[in-house]
Amino acid sequence: MASRDRILMCPPDHFSVEYEINPWMAGNTGQLSPETAHRQWNALREALAEYADVEIIEPQPDLPDMVFTANAGTVLGNKAIASHFMPKERRGEEPHFKRWFSERGFDLYDLPDEIGFEGAGDSLFDRGGEWLWAGHGFRTEIEAHRHLQEFFDREVVSIRLTDERFYHIDTCMCPLTGGYLMYHPPAFGYDSRIAIESRIPSHKRIVVDTADAGHFACNAVNIGDRVFVNSASDPLKARLMRDGFKVIEVDLSEFLKAGGSAKCLTLKLTEPPA
């Protein structure tokens, strides 16, 4: 019997929009409902807990975005590279995530301080090939990619992000079980689209349109044949179902106001998949 995935989450006790570090935050300062955010976060945690073991990191005061644990770092086996945030507003999270990794016995890589890197928000392990998709352009610098490749001993495919609304690769790309890939092509530079299309056969590429991308359909959590997502249109759900996936929608509207959704709220600790 295969072991269950382990996923790291952080309760939204201090979640709010207090600054603007991505376009989704604009105009949302002070506009969140803490009660709704807690209800939505708990609904996601409970949905995921049916298929994975959810671990919790303690939220910290004055760090409203710590809830987005995808940005804690990137994990492969017992190795982890913790993030070094580009926006100064999130740098206070770094020692808490580093301590969490260290206390649980991860071999933690010390990324040079001058290199911006935002963890699994900008690095996604493919589910069919032995490579890592790594974003750059907004919140992760391409200089980080060499460190990822050397430390994890995985080929890194650099993907240039060109639309500031999709500032992390996990907002516009989601590798799925069996080598499928959900992605929003307009978010990537031309060479990056070619890199994607050269590696993923056409029948396994699931193109996400502008409307679905704007509802963070690509920011999904995939566990086996389950795809957990804020929302997906009927055509997108039909395509995923045709390919053997079961779509589970969880309303995460409060977190969209800060530029995040299901994937942003989670960090998979079992890579490659268990």
Image (cartoon, rainbow, N blue to C red):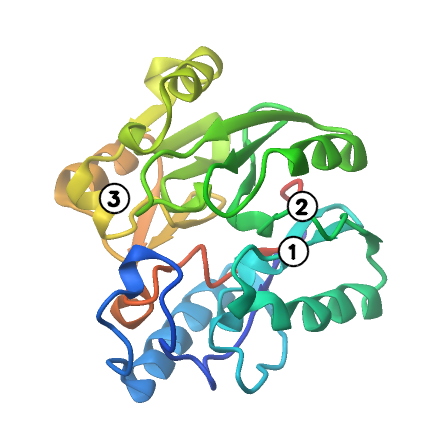
In the rendered image, residue 65, in percent from the top left (x then y), is placed at 48, 71
Q: Which mark is residue 61?
A: none
Residue toward you, 68 or 1: 68
Q: Separation of disc 3 and disc 1 at Cα?
A: 26 Å
Three-letter amino acid code at the position of disc 3: Ala
Three-letter amino acid code at the position of disc 1: His
Q: Which residue is mark 3?
A: 213
Q: Which mark is residue 84?
A: 1
Does residue 76 appear in this view? yes
The tag earlier along the polypeptide, 3 or 1, is: 1
**Tag 2 near tag 1, CB within 8 Å:** yes
Residue toward you, 85 or 11: 85
Does residue 4 appear in this view? no
Residue at 21% over, 38% down: 236
Crowd rating for badge 2 (residues with CA inside 10 Å; few <14, some 14–19, many 20+): some
Task: Specify the quadrant of the image occupied by residue 97.
Answer: bottom right
Task: Specify the quadrant of the image occupied by residue 57.
Answer: bottom right
Q: Which residue is mark 2?
A: 115
Residue at 73% over, 53% down: 113
In the rendered image, residue 44, in percent from the top left (x then y), is placed at 40, 68
Drawn side of residue 133 relative to residue 197, left or right:
right
Instruction: Please say if 156 is above or below 5.
Output: above
Residue toward you, 256 or 160: 160
Crowd rating for badge 1 (residues with CA inside 10 Å; few <14, some 14–19, many 20+): many
Residue at 60% over, 50% down: 119
Query: Tag 2's secondary structure?
Result: loop
In the rendered image, residue 159, in percent from the top left (x then y), is placed at 49, 28
**Tag 3 near tag 1, CB within 8 Å:** no
Q: Residue furthest top?
A: 198
Residue at 62% over, 70% down: 93
Query: Tag 3's secondary structure?
Result: helix
